[in-house]
Image: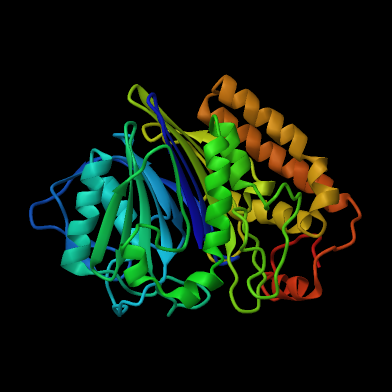
């Protein structure tokens, strides 16, 4: 489950996305350079092999550790894409390209948002979409909708099997886990799964907030939103904290957790990107990155707790969620001030990441040493207890 936002203006395009997946599904930031490939080369995607193109772009992506494809990313031309799971009445292929594959392939092959849509629809018609997309449940699959942007325009591209529809975005436009393009949505939506995903609630919220947003800091706040100004998630036994953009897992029927977040400011003169590289934007720090400037972000995360940024942050995230109202104020004001400083006066990206790493260690110690009673419902505590790796040392119960 995810939420993706775009705001098309005369001078720039703003983009934001929360990637919502399974709680222990670590996600990392990855750079890939432009390349020239051998004629006739084949490309192995997540589940299938397809013909490679002659040239591919330099890309920056946020990728679940076990997938070839990307949840979101940008390329050297300023094309920026995020995808959403959607549930339709069309049949699901056993194997095909995943939505994440389509994101990465379009970034590698397109130099504009319009061309990226053409790449995606052509691949969809040739190969279809399918294959397992879940980490906890490898058989979980879905169709996809995408927000495709560049420094001048943006498009919503929605799919159902090999069928698709495109709508150009005007002003603020958001998508969630349901089809939205008139005619196409009514024809193809699976109403039950769409309702369980709580996508209508989230999309109403993100649309209102996007219409009020003035810049990237407003988008940071949007992605951290728990709904109606709440400082902490409001949980439901059905689907946990899935009713708000900053998603927290724990539902008995459906559960999804924000595992990475991304914000972009796309301009013809150059694009800027900020990423968390970590779960739970409400506890995370947005750090600057550039497509053309790979930096050291630490080891890419794996299936088990390690010294990657993603898993190090989980010690902070899971400790804070015991009692967010009490524990968030211990570090969030310093974090917000630092982000504001970075947006106003962009720092060297490597220096920012190094500073963020040091602050993560500091904030984790402060939170873990602070006594706090777990305020979450019992079923939420049980859910997270079952997903706590033995080697992940936190103060959470």
As displayed, is residue 310 above or below residue 168? below
Coloration of the structure image:
rainbow
Residue 350, position as x, y percentages in the image: 53, 31
Residue 287 percent location from the top left of the image = 56, 36
Q: Where residue 169 sits in the image (x, y, percent)?
A: 36, 43
Residue located 59% across and 33% down the image: 217
Residue 257 spot, x, y in % from top left: 60, 62
294 is higher (above) or lower (below) than 99:
above
The residue at the point 31 percent across, 62 percent down is: 183
Quadrant of residue 255 within the rendered picture: bottom right
Q: How many marks?
A: 0
Q: Is residue 390 left or right of residue 68?
A: right
- 245 relative position to 80: left or right: right
Tell me where residue 392 sits by quadrant: bottom right
Question: Of 104 and 199, which appears nearest the observer?
Answer: 199
Residue 38 as seen in the image, left or right of residue 236: left
Residue 210 shows in the view: yes
Foreground of the two, 37 or 245? 245
**Image quarter (top left, top right, bottom left or bottom right) of the C terminus:** bottom right
Can you tell which quarter of the image residue 133 is in?
A: bottom left
- Whether residue 188 sits left or right of residue 62 in the image: it is left
At x 67%, y 56%, the residue is: 314
Q: At 36% from the left edge and 54% from the top edge, which residue is drawn? A: 146
- In the depicted structure, whether residue 345 falls above or below residue 49: above
Q: Nearer the viewer, residue 243 or 369?
A: 243
- Residue 308 visible to the viewer: no
Residue farthest along the top direction in this orientation: 345
């Amino acid at each position: 489950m995810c939420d993706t936002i775009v705001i098309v203006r005369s001078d720039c395009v703003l983009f934001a996305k929360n990637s919502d997946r399974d709680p222990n599904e670590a996600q990392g930031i990855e750079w890939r350079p432009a390349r020239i490939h051998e004629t006739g080369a084949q490309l192995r995607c997540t589940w299938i092999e397809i013909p490679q193109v002659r040239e591919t772009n330099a890309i920056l992506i946020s990728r679940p550790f076990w997938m070839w494809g990307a949840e979101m990313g940008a390329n050297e031309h300023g094309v920026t894409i995020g995808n959403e799971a959607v549930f339709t009445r069309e049949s699901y292929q056993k194997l095909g390209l995943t939505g994440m594959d389509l994101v990465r392939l379009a970034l590698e092959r397109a130099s504009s948002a319009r061309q990226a849509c053409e790449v995606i629809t052509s691949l969809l018609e040739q190969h279809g979409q399918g294959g397992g997309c879940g980490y906890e449940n490898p058989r979980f699959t879905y169709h996809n909708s995408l927000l495709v942007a560049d420094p001048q325009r943006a498009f919503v591209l929605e799919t159902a099997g090999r069928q698709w529809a495109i709508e150009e975005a005007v002003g603020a436009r958001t998508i969630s886990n349901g089809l939205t393009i008139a005619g196409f949505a009514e024809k193809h939506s699976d109403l039950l799964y769409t309702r369980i995903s709580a996508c209508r609630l989230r999309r109403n919220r993100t649309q209102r907030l996007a219409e009020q947003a003035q810049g990237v800091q407003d988008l940071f706040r949007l992605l951290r939103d728990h709904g109606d100004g709440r400082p902490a998630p409001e949980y439901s036994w059905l689907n946990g904290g899935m009713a708000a953009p900053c998603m927290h897992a724990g539902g008995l029927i459906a559960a999804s957790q924000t595992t990475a977040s991304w914000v972009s400011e796309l301009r013809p003169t150059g694009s800027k990107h900020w990423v968390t590289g970590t779960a739970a934007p409400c506890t995370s720090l947005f750090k600057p990155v550039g497509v053309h400037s790979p930096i050291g972000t630490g080891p890419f995360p794996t299936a088990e707790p390690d010294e990657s940024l993603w898993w190090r942050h989980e010690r902070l995230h899971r400790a804070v969620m015991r009692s967010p109202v009490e524990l968030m104020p211990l570090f969030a004001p310093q974090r917000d001030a630092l982000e504001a400083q970075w947006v106003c006066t962009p720092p060297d990206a490597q220096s920012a990441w190094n500073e963020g790493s040091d602050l993560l260690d500091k904030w984790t110690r402060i939170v873990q040493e602070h006594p706090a009673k777990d305020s979450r419902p019992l079923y939420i505590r049980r859910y997270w207890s079952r997903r706590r790796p033995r080697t992940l040392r936190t103060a959470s119960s």
